[in-house]
Amino acid sequence: MATGHAATAATIELTRLGVAFTMHPYAHDPAERSFGDEAARALGLSPDEVFKTLVVMVDDAPTVAVLPVSARLDMKALAACCGGRRAELADLALAQRLTGYVIGGISPIGQKRQLPTLIDEQAWLHDVVYVSGGKRGLDIGLAPADLIRATSGTIAAIARAEPS
């Protein structure tokens, strides 16, 4: 368990579950809009091990996709994994309302209502993955198996390489 920083819904949930995690605060630039890239740079981590959390509507049902910052979400693959036909990013206001988190600080853990969650299979390539800790300027590191447990998530091939 991590201590010494203000608790968020994500850290409270991880503590409740008895999951080991580390907190990684950094100075957030309010002008920055590429939140995952900012976290990777600020923390000196590879964008392959920092994972972004996206809220996606699959046939009008909200779903969470967790994938490396270095990758793009494959909407067709996500829809297929969910048994749907169509997927699109949720409206930002809806994403905030559903999760209880602000854009740039949406954690897959401790959401207002736990949404179905798909975690890209690349998580298994790392001993530790980093996801938003529930606010801008805070990431948490945890083992992929613990991320799956904390989100009741499913591992799936939902990412594709970001074009160069």
Image: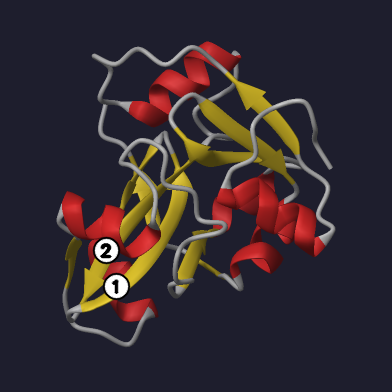
Q: Is residue 139 left or right of residue 97?
A: right
| 100 relative position to 135: left or right | left
In the image, residue 83 sits, relative to residue 88, either above or below, namely below
- In this figure, which colouring scheme has been used for the structure? secondary structure
SS at mark 2 in the image: strand
Q: Which quadrant of the figure contains the N terminus?
A: top right
Give percent across and percent down for residue 10: 60, 50
Q: Nearer the viewer, residue 137 or 119?
A: 137
Instruction: Name the amino acid, label 2.
Output: Val
The 10 Å Cα crowd at callout 2, few under 14, some 14 to 19, many 20 or more, is many
Looking at the picture, does residue 54 appear above or below residue 105?
Answer: below
The image position of residue 27, as x and y in percent, is: 48, 12
Q: Is residue 24 left or right of residue 77?
A: right
Q: Residues within 10 Å of mark 1 (few under 14, many from 20)?
A: many
Displayed quadrant of residue 128: top right
Inspect the image, locate mark 1, and give the three-letter code of the amino acid beneath it: Pro
Name the residue beneath numbered marker 1: 62
Would residue 43 appear left or right of 32 to someone viewing this image?
Answer: right
Q: Secondary structure at mark 1?
A: strand
**136 to 13, vertically: above or below:** above
Above or below: residue 102 compared with residue 57: above
Q: Residue at x 55, y 41 (%)?
A: 131
Image position, residue 161 (x, y; %): 36, 41
Residue drawn 38% across and 59% down?
99
> Which of the two labelled residues, at mark 1 and mark 2, occupies the earlier sequence position?
2
State whether residue 73 appears in this view. yes
Where on the picture, by quarter, is residue 154? bottom right
Asked whether disc 1 touches disc 2, contact meaning CB atoms under 8 Å apart, the reply is yes
- CA distance separating discs 1 and 2: 6 Å
Quadrant containing the C terminus in the rendered view: top left
Residue matched to label 2: 56
